[in-house]
Image: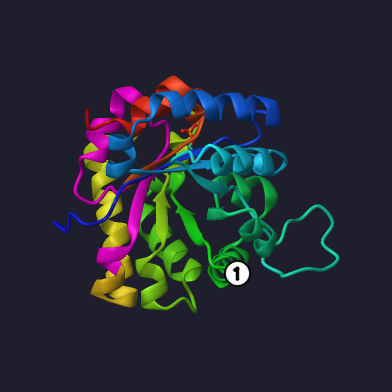
Amino acid sequence: MSDQPSRKPLISGNWKMHLNHFDALRLVQELSYKVTEDDVAAVDISLHPPFTDLRTVQTVIDADRLPFLLGAQHCHHEEKGAFTGEVAPAMLAKLNVSYVIAGHSERREVFGETDETVNLKVRAILTAGMVPILCVGETLAERDAQQAEAKVAGQIRAGLDGVNAQQVAGMVIAYEPIWAIGTGRTASAEDAQAMCAFVRSTVRDTLGNDAAEGVRVQYGGSVKPANAKELMTQPDIDGALVGGASLEADPFARIAQYRL
Ligand code: PGA
């Protein structure tokens, strides 16, 4: 547990494979009417649209000076090459992308990403000057078998291999129990806090106190306006990675305004 108040919460909207670039423009504009300067003084807000929307979202953020940080959902770890369908970290950085999700459970489960490839991505994202959001989390079977901590600790150690303490201090780790993603079933605030504290203690054991106190730990899995405050006011939860509830302006803005 940590009483360090200096970690600014990060609320991230992971749109997954939803919203074309016209829909994206409308959502970003609607969000900009709801999110106030006070909100962005209190929390950072990152938006992670599909690749085809990035340029549109970047343009409206820059042109209208909107208080959102641009994010991506995925990237390849190589700088360039014959990787049909893939996108390189430097291409994202060129679009002013600040945050890139690495190792989301859907990428691991559906697209075969491993701890090793996720680690390569984390390192490539850092090399390109962006912040990785490293996703970790257990399945229901693993939780029921008392394996949640072992799974998460293994994912953190492997995902951060070769990354130094200073880099980790600036990173984000998202704890997302797989059984809570898109299911409407949320971890209780106590369980989420316990696992996010465990994430931080694993970072402390591996990379020391400065990394542990600096790293922001998000909770993800069916975060919505009704549960955001309880989750976000836990001492080791420094933000939320939001899927379904980020696809409309009203619930996502209310999550970002959890403190009100
Ligand atoms: P959800 O998705 O909020 O729809 O559960 C969270 C995530 O996958 O990051």
Task: Name which residue lies at 58% across and 40% down.
Answer: 63
- Give percent across and percent down for residue 77: 67, 66
**Position above or below: 250 against 47:** above
Task: Name which residue lies at 41% across and 57% down.
Answer: 172
Residue with the mark numbered 1:
124
**Of the pair 194 and 36, the residue shown nearer to us:** 36
Horizontal relation, residue 160 to residue 150: left or right: right
Q: Which colour scheme is used?
A: rainbow
**Of the pair 189 and 23, the residue shown nearer to us:** 23
Task: Name which residue lies at 32% across and 59% down.
Answer: 199
Q: Work out which quarter of the rendered image holds the C terminus and state it.
A: top left
Task: Name which residue lies at 63% across and 41% down.
Answer: 59
Horizontal relation, residue 182 to residue 207: left or right: right
**Position above or below: 230 against 96:** above
- Give percent across and percent down for residue 132: 50, 59
Q: Give the range drawn in magenta.
A: 212-238
Q: Is mark 1 on a helix, strand or loop?
A: helix
Say which quarter of the image contains residue 2: bottom left
Horizontal relation, residue 251 to residue 74: left or right: left
Say which quarter of the image contains residue 83: bottom right
**Of the pair 3 and 93, the residue shown nearer to us:** 93
Residue 29 in view, yes or no = yes
Q: What residue type is labelled 1?
A: Ala
Q: Does the magenta stretch include residue 40?
A: no
Q: Is residue 226 magenta?
A: yes
Q: Work out which quarter of the rendered image holds the N terminus and state it.
A: bottom left
